[in-house]
Amino acid sequence: MEWKSSRDAGVLDGAGRPIVGPGGVDAFAAAMRSNRLAMIVTDPDRDDNPIVFVNDAFLQLTGYAREEIVGSNCRLLQGPETDAATVSRIRAALDARTDINVDILNYRKDGSPFWNALYISPVFDEHGHLLYFFSSQADVTGRKDAEQLVYVEKERIERAVEERTAELRERTAELESALEARTALLHEVDHRVKNNLQMVSALILMQSRTIPDDGIRQSLQAMLTRIEALSTVHRRLYQSDDVSRFDVGDFVRDLVGDLAQASQVDIDTRLDLEPVSVPAESAAPIALIVNELVTNALKHAFAGRDGGLIEVKVKRGADRFRIEIRDDGAGIGAPATGSDGFGMRLIRSIARQLSAEIDWTPADPGTRVTVDMPYPAARAGAASNRS
């Protein structure tokens, strides 16, 4: 069947051939001519696949006249900054007779650039013969500018984040280095204090051996255990990774073991110790009060016996913790209110310092002493709130 068309009734190419098949010429031609989207048709059967049809929207988009466009290849829209890789993709799609949809930088007749959202599709007849390439164009410069603005802003933010991250890494490294130096310094201080206390202990021990008075020797021996308790505190701090905290449970384990080993009777120890972390500055008073209570039990509970049991518990609560010391000795009961021995005065003084409550009760057999106190940090916070 022969196609029939006219300039008014349909769309003809440069050779007078219709570019749509029978029955669709008028509708397709009218749609292309009146469409606000820029459209062209090229003829692959002619040399260099020239443009054979353009609509008015394309002329308005590019600034060219119809006679300047028809018969030319679409490459006349390319310019100095048109991406060669995108052009190669278009050429490959034309050679493969496939659709392609790309954004490409094109140039108007006056040389002004614009971003062109280009769509190209091949048109085949019923026998599969390639008749034309249909192409639409749209000016998407605004979208590309917005994308570029987003890209530039994204790059700026990423650079700012990288710079800030680098600053934070550098600052973190400085802080870690300072913390390591501080930890090393405090470890060295604790190590030297421990060594000095051990030297003091040795001097007291040597001096006590030269004193004939038994009462004085016992007083020096009691002082020696207190110094050794403080030495144990600094040894624990020296061995700890966190120099700002002190674990009461670990200290009690060391202290009770040392005192039981040094005792003149055979002592069986039973320990139930939960980890309780307190600030390092609270370690010494807690160590002294535990030392006094355990030493007191070893000294008085097992008189006339070859051995006995001492049980020590450390239990933590929500805002308080408890230290419990029990023996199975004769039972000494609660000390009288007016007791004025140095050890008892020291216990009461430290208890006030720690805001601790101390309770002596019969254990049947023996005596149980409980020391109930707030966590030092909680106590400091409460004091701050009151002020």
Image (cartoon, helix red, strand yellow):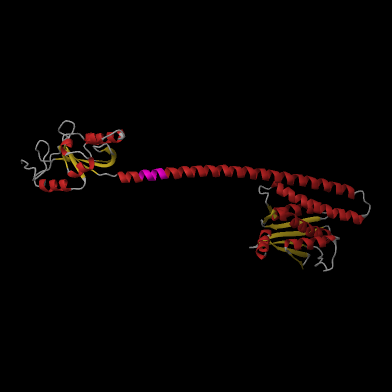
* The furthest residue to the top: 47
Residue 6, image x, y percentages: 7, 43
Where 130 falls versus 299 (above or below)?
above
- Residue 154 visible at all: yes
Question: Residue 28, percent across and down?
Answer: 14, 47
Most extreme residue toward the right is 212
Q: In which quarter of the image is the C terminus?
A: bottom right
Q: Determine the residue positioned at 65% across, 61% down.
A: 381
User: Main SS type for the magenta part?
Assistant: helix
Determine whether, in the image, residue 40 is placed left or right of residue 142: left
The residue lying toward the viewer, choosing from 32 and 235, is: 32
Indicate the quadrant where residue 80 lies. top left
Q: Magenta stretch?
A: 147-153
Is residue 152 found inside the magenta-colored segment of the image?
yes
Viewer-side residue, 305 vs 212: 212
Quarter location, residue 325: bottom right
Could you tell me which residue is drawn at 25 percent across and 38 percent down? 108
**How many marks do you count on the picture?**
0
For the point 79% across and 53% down, the residue is 259
Q: Is residue 50 above or below residue 325?
A: above
Could you tell whether 304 is left or right of 5 in the image? right
Q: Quadrant of the N terminus?
A: top left
Tell me, yes or no, if residue 301 can be seen here: no
The image position of residue 225, as x and y in percent, is 81, 53
Please name the residue shown 30% across and 44% down the image. Answer: 141
Which of 193 and 306 lies nearest the eye of the viewer? 193
Q: Which of 137 and 361 is in front in this view?
A: 137
Residue 172 coordinates in the image, percent (x, y): 58, 44
